[in-house]
Amino acid sequence: MEIKFTNRFFLLWKKILHIIMRTFILLFCSTVFSFTSSDIFSQSTKVIIEEDKVITIDEVFDILRTQTEFTFIYQEDLFKDAPKIHVKKGIIKANKLLKESLSKSNYNFNITKSNKIIVIEAPKEIVEVQQFSVSGTITDIDGQPLPGASVLEKGTNNGVQSDFDGKFSLKVASSDAVLVISYIGYATKEVVVNNQTNIEIILKESASELDEVVVVGYGQTSQKKLISAVSQVKTDKIEKAPFANMVEGLAGRAPGLITRQSGGDYGSIPRISIRGGGTPVVYIDDIQRDIAALAALPPGDIKNISILKDAAATAIYGFNAPSGVILVTTNTGAKEKLTFSYRNTFAIQRPTTKPTWLTAYEHSLLLNSAAFNDGLDPIISDDLLETFRTNSDPINRPNKRDVYDRAINKMALLKRHNIKLDGTAGNTSIFTSLDFFRQDGLYNGNDYGLNRYSLRSNINQKVDALNLTIKSNLSIVREEIERTPLSSWSIFSHVRNWRPGVPLFNEAGNYIGNENPLAEADQKAGVSRNRSSDIDYRLEFDFEIPQIPGLHLKAVGKYGFGNGFNKNFRTNPSGIAPLYTDDNQLRDIGKAQLSQSASEGYNYFLEGHITYLKSFKKHTVDFTGIYTVGESFGESFSASRRDFPSPQVPFLFAGSPEGRDNSGSGSESGRIGYVARLKYDFDAKYFVQVSGRYDGFDGFEDGYKYNLFPSVALGWNIDNETFAKPILDKLRISSFKLRGSWGEVGNSGARFQYLPRYNLNQNVYYSYDAFNTGFSEGNLVPTSNTTTWSKVESRNLGLDFGLFNDKLKGNLDWFYYETTGFLGSPEDTYTTTLGKSLPQINIDSEHRREGVELNLQYNTRLGNVDFYVGGNVTYFDQLWAKTDEIENDLKNPYTRQAQQIDVALRGYIDQGYYQTIEDLLNSPHREASTDTYLGDIRYQDVNGDGRVDGDDFRRLGKGDFPHIQYGINTGFAYKGLSVNVLFQGTSNRQMYIGGGGSIWNDALNHMLFTIQDDSWSPTNRDALFPRTSTFNNANGSNNQTTSSFWLQDAWYLRMKSLDITYNLKSILPKNVLPGISQWNLTLSGTNLFTISPINDYFLDPETSSTNNYGYPNGKTFSLGMNLTF
Amino acid sequence: MKTFKKNLFAWFVCALVVLSNFSCSDDALDKKPLDAFSEADIWADAQLAEGFILTLYNNALSRWIRQETDDWTDNIVPNDDNGGSRHVQQGNVNINEDYGWNRFGVIRAANLAIARISASNSIDENTRKKLVAEAKALRAMTYFWQARRFGGLIIVDKVLTPDDDLELPRSSERETYNFIIQDLEEAVLDLPVDVTTGREGRLNKGAAYAFLTMVALQIGDYDKVISAANEVETLGYSLDPVYKNMFNSYAGTKSSPENILVYSRGEDFNNYINTRMFRNLVNVSNGRKLHATAVPQFNDDDLFEAWPLRWPSQELVDAYLVKDGTERKGLDNQGMPSKDFYANRDDRFEQSIVRDSAQYRNSIFTFRRGGNSHWTSNPQGSWGMSKTGYMFRKWMYEEDFIFWNLPVNWAEPILRLGEVYLNKAEAYARKSDLPNAVKYLNMTRETHGGLPPLSSGVSETEFWKYYDIERRVELVMEDDYYWSLIRWARAENRTTIPQLSGKLHGLDMELDGLINVIESPWSVELNFKPQRLLFPVPDSQIRTNSKLAGAQNPGW
């Protein structure tokens, strides 16, 4: 018999200890002295399980030993026959872990004074004779089998574990025996056999028993112990819906997260903000990336997304985090065995809004009435009117305007294929995913679109003998975007502006006209091709110091490199397919041209981590210290040629040597940070955390590069207080936590402002037959180099609560951010004569942002149906408390920026139209409005000085970027069926749709929508739009000038996504497709419907252009499948 | 095995130690911009310093090209979408807008070049002097552009720093002009003589003297005008025998013996939309944009795809004299057959204006109702059609297909001998030396216009009448006429300018082609107010600079 010491430090002493311990064991074996495991640890002692895994009891003891102050002594092969334990990621009470681990067998315990626990096997009891045979399957509510679940006949030691398919069979004493099914992380269930021979058992995840793990910066904690403002987003539902990118998928899913799509062009990424701040920084597996990298992530690769909001969560990111952090953790091998799964999605995309257009006849009538209003001749002759009305010349004078329908492909596809290998083999856990994503453009004339290939390989290797875990993450992303050579904005503006009655093709079917959007979207126009590759590799050595339980040393390195190659090839300078004349002659519109650019760059960082997590009785200490250093470098060049003799060979060499051009650039950057976080809690009741980063920025002068960004957070779990328990129980409050934080993060601003620089101006002046290079003075340099960080102070108060045994959970947060010391050129002094802006320094300004967010989630089970409903809402506003603005503006309450909350814009307040002659005579006009007629917009003379001028401008409305955003999610699961719905919306939001070239313009060539027929006339006095005129800027641009008239409500509520999934395996007989554990079919869609007042103007509330010049926002309908082997 | 484990642990510790060594150095933060030059580099190298001057050229001359100030006069009926010009014609000028007050960035660059190049030890003396002279001349050009608008300016003659008192006062108009003249007189000493230099866009003696005639004329230093003009005459320039050569092709503009300073852009970075011509031409062609009944149809090769903004007014056309030196005005000749009306005019008429039944490119343009270019001839609307019955030929590269984003070589003269002669004529006239005034008026009148010389015995009133006509016609669309009108009013202490008042006229002939002049429906009511002899200083500047208190221009 050999004794195993789990504490390896004493290996040298092994022999001596052998003798001592044998003595011990002999001693205690003879003493019949039985503990129940639940007595060993204090109630509050908990341990963290970092990820789902199957481990031996020896390993359970390892975990307990490192996270508590106990060590274990037992016979080395004591547990060799004991079943393995399946543990789920999370935080669990030490007692419970021990109890569940040992529940299969009977052991006795003894505790020594030095906190050593001695374990011995108890004598076996005599088991009863089994009489009845029962078998069954244990699954979770999604139908996933639960391997290793424990099945015990109640009141006996008779039990088995389920196999990999969740199956078990057991002989029980009688046909009415009771089975107790338990599985860590799930609620234990008792089932009466009741003569059944095959029982299907569904276990439900136990929310209250298992505390959810929350990933925070450089570590993790549990929901119960979380005292900073962090929201978690689950990505499983995002994966089911055909979102074009991951960022769009986040909309409405977390409190504090505000998104605004910018049109629906493929490759376009929504604007995203945490609580109304700027673009947050993204970390993927602790590697700093950008929003584009997040957008490109296959949803199935993601294990978890944490939104870090307050400084308690973000201070450790220093100057990267003034706008918060989105922390993405990708999957690591989770399953017990290697599983292989394949998922696909096929979706059809359609525009969310479909404008209706005037026919040529209707448009002509509008033109003539406008000319009539101006006292001019009719523009369209009666003959032509008649031609349109009767559509008698459909080739040359088509009445119907169908350019939009012709431009849009009704079968534009979006598709995804994803292959995953996921699981553990021995000490190795593997997650690899290969993803292909394709999004077609909406154009009919070409097959351009976006292709993305993503490979991820996350491999963790545990080297037991060295106490070492090696984590390797490799990610390769290749993206290829093909577009029309002209921007989608150009093409859709031409679609928008194409004149009714003008044909797009001649009689022979060839393109005619100029700026013919169909010809511009035609493949023959050329192509704009962007290809980029990014490769990132991260390697981590996590060494657990055996001498000091709980202490880890980590070395982390990352190297990434990438390149981009962009090419814009036009078969002619206009970027349009060959154009013909009406009589089908090919027009000469110039020769082909090509411009291209390439960029290349690399970056790395190195980190050393020290972490220490240890509980001493009721005290838990959690320390993280990190040193990080990183650098990056990038270069690019561009080149172009024109006058290609033929468009057949689209490569540079084939162009004319005339007009060759090239250029290039380079940049480098570096950063250094020292990070520390210390968290302490007493009995999981009182928490305090201090964290910070001493951060270095390369863009400031030596001596001003570094700054410390600290934070403090406090938390109080009131539900753990004995005095509060009765009250909370009475109120059915199951959990209740208060938390608060304060901290500072940095904002670095422009780099190298301290260096006197001159800029090179390429091709600045043409002389002696060449464009020459010039130079100009750069920014002025501060005379005393004291420019340094601006600071964002963050305060957060939060309340986390659960009711009805945590069936209803919620968080309520108040937040406040104050930014001071912005880098800028002071404007409060007169500097016009200087001829330059003042040097950038930390100016005396202060900006505040404040708001609240609420999140509620209700989960329940009604009969066989699991049902959830939840929602979140975020509200914020902001103001400049102190500004650096010219005194003149500051003195005027209507012009100053200081002390004003966000508005959409400043402008006149409209009072409808001039309806009567009396209106015309009695109300003041703008000075430029010298030709005012009835039907023009009347503006309020707010200050009553008898003039309408700039002094009457007032602040109007709320801007386009939402200040209130909410999400409502709901769904249910019943047997193999699950349905999830997400609504998302905003409130109190306006869009400015006026100005030149906009939805309405008095220039006639813009009057093409059916709604534009609704213009003012004596018989249509409450018209949507003012009177028409043939003049572009009629009446001194009176009707286009900035005013409340054009500020339209743009709140919206949209069904962001819907998915209906059915697991076909749940209806198929067991022996069909035996190798397949799961076969799901999913019907889903995004943006399925939208309610918004702005739809009346044929605008999507998240359009990229209020002129309707943008690529349409898309809705999608999809069918998908997921197969798991 | 044991030793291996121990070693690995040791290796790991070593790795951490190595890593922590990084922390002792700040190398990672020792970064600099890779795309910028240091100040010392620029001023130590003649070529880089010259590059600085080239940027200055670009910034200073950007205000001297395509000013489109003729749009503010009765020369032009703006197209309906030319709102900006219509505003100024109407008199919608106000103190809240900036009409070009803040050019201190360019002034600073000139001051910087003057100071740093003068002080440079590593640039040879000749280059140094030449570059400084160019900087001074460009400073003068920048200030003069502003002085015409605002009168007295804030003179900054050195490189200011943020620590200086930046609230500087306005100098008087006289002081401002003295400063400008001094700059030019200093610059001219060190500028090269070679005439090609100016045609390649670099300042030379000829350009500086020619410019001096403009400046001195504006402020009334008539002797300086005459002496500077005399200097120009010694430098080898001569009137171009064919007027249109100076405007109607790139090569012609660059090589014309009359042109003194030419701004040009090569087609590598220049498209039609960046040129004057793109805004002068109709947008019409056979097919849907033209009634099938229009007579005649355009030549099938002629597609006119410009985005026009301006049309010649009848007022301008009336200024082209008949070959016998008399006037033939539209309103006085209603009902006259148009071919007779246009016959026998100043040579510059056909070279500057496309009138009814004239050929442009391969097509005959007919501006009458039922013709191909009347505003009712386009079934799609009047936007791209002439609003006056005329179209400009001046500035048009007639053989080109004009499309907004096609590349084109472009050149436009900023200074030329013809204007110098006219400046000199005006200076003599102001000095009441009529014989000399007439002599120089006749230079362009005879050479370009093919008109008989004005008699040296004309009365002063007669002289000024024909001088006005000559200047308007010779320099039409060269951004001169508005400033001449203002200059004449100020010199004569007038507060009214008849040319800037009332509605403008155009032609609306029936198919019979008989002259029918009408008040153009597209013309606004021109409304010149006395205070517009100078533009207002932006109110925000007056309110923020205490030294400007009370320094607003009269009437604003």
Image (tube, coloured by chain):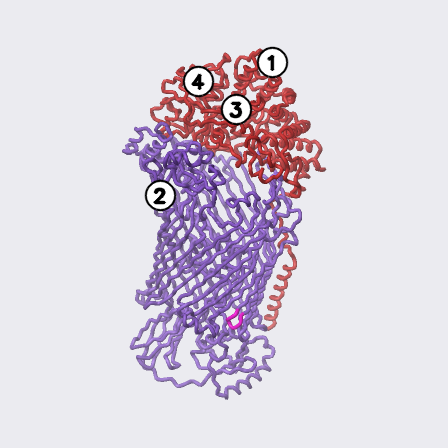
The residue pinned by badge 1 equals B435
Q: Position of residue B532 (x, y in %)?
A: 53, 29
Q: Quadrant of the N terminus of chain B?
A: bottom right
What SS does tag 4 mark? loop
What SS does tag 3 mark? loop
The residue pinned by badge 4 equals B330
- In this picture, residue B154 sits left or right of residue A959: right
Parent chain of label 1: B
**Label 3 vs label 4, nearer the camera:** 3
Parent chain of label 4: B
Q: Quadrant of the C terminus of chain B?
A: top right
Say which residue appears at 48% left-offset and 43% top-offset.
Answer: A567
Q: Which numbered disc, 3 or 4, marks the residue that appears first in the sequence?
A: 4
Write the start and end of the magenta stretch as one range: A681-686
Which hue belongs to chain B?
red
Question: In which quarter of the view is residue A318 placed?
Answer: bottom right
The disc labelled 2 sits on which kind of residue?
Pro
The alpha-carbon separation of the residues under discs 3 and 1 comes to 28 Å
User: Total number of numbered labels?
Assistant: 4
The disc labelled 4 sits on which kind of residue?
Gly
Say which residue appears at 59% left-offset and 77% top-offset.
Answer: A10
**Which chain is in purple here?**
A
- In this picture, residue A1110 sits left or right of residue B445: left
Q: Which numbered disc, 3 or 1, marks the residue that appears first in the sequence?
A: 1
Question: In which quarter of the view is residue A696 placed?
Answer: bottom right
The residue pinned by badge 3 equals B496
